[in-house]
Image: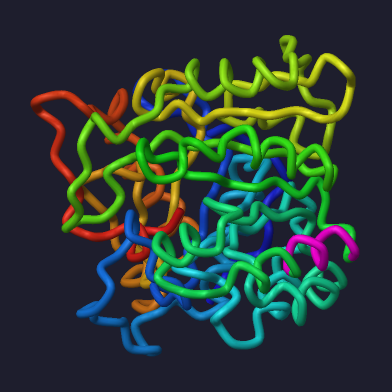
Amino acid sequence: MAEPAREHGSEQLIDPFARRVKDLRISITDRCNFRCTYCMPEEGMQWMNRSELLTYEEQARIARVCVERWEFQAIRVTGGEPTVRAHLPRLFEMLAPLAVDLAMTTNGVRLPELAHRLAEAGLGRVNISIDSLNRETFRELTRRDELDRVLAGIDAALDAGLTPVKLNVVVIRGVNDHEVVELAAFGRAKGVGVRFIEFMPLDAQGEWTREGVVPAHEILDAVDAVFPLEPAPRSSGPASSHPEPARLARYADGIGDVGVIPSVTEPFCDDCDRVRITAEGKFRTCLFALDETDLRAVLRDGGTDDELAAAITAAVGTKWAGHHIGKVDFIRPARSMSQIGG
């Protein structure tokens, strides 16, 4: 049985490298209606049984403990693709009373039907993944012909007020790097921020190589050559106390901003404040962590909030300094991105 809530913000959660942990990523499903080449194989995925997944009540309980005990400031719901899970607005109704920055990462396909309902339930903002504006390239990357639906999803998010809307673009050399300026122009025209993401080894079975990575400086240089950029000031939006990991620049003409998440060439591990929960309740201190802590066992064995908090504290005590992507000692997690959660 859950315990009565403690006084808000009684302490902070600090990892071994003096970084304050205050951002919780909650994966709610390992399933997805896309099969992006850098995220999962086209076939052969073994989906979790529904009984293995944390319930919305269990996810909300973990989130509540994180906010009440340690003043977490941000919660992001991810997948797989979170919108494929039934009754999604109900989860946001449970999370909304925590009064934190509440966001979701999605491919946007189901937003035309869900955007307004999610906004009414308490969702604050969304990041929408779109790696190409070219129909054939989009189909090759996602293995689905759904570009029009994603574009409609962006419009639906804007109409529902899920702002600031941001677009996530994984840039892969020789695949979609030639579209960087076109995607930046699209973001300017729509009034949405574009966040280019360096290609990372996210598929446990994939063929990631360093040669596929387009460095952050190259991406920004390409945009700057067409749309002059200048340093961006610190944001003052709902997540201003929780800065995003992107290297940000704003357009010199004042029409929005653009960013690059340089996870490979300029890792931001020194400032990492994130932890994450997989869909079946495994607590991870890094996207590329090799160890996990089973919070589902604590929840379903009748653990108290104190016991749940103790498990989280112990796990954060093992958080490493950072991943070693591109180095000889890097070990790829045994599970794909869709199974871990973005």
Closer to us: 6 or 66 = 66
Name the residue at the top extreme. 230
- The image shows residue 23 at horizontal and vertical percentages of 57, 42
* Residue drawn at (39%, 45%) of the image: 175
Residue for point 58% across, 38% down: 22
Q: Quadrant of residue 157?
A: bottom right
**Where does residue 85 sit, x and y in percent of width and height?**
55, 82
> Is 155 in the magenta?
yes
> In the image, residue 176 lies at what x, y percent?
46, 44
What is the chief secondary structure element of the magenta stretch?
helix
Residue 283's spot in the image, x, y percent? 36, 55
Range shown magenta: 153-159
The residue nearer to you, when weighing 178 against 100, is 178
Q: Quadrant of residue 149?
A: bottom right
Question: Residue 262 is drawn in which quadrant?
Answer: top left
Which of these two is toward me, 315 or 281? 281
The colour scheme used here is rainbow
Q: Is residue 127 above or below residue 156?
A: above
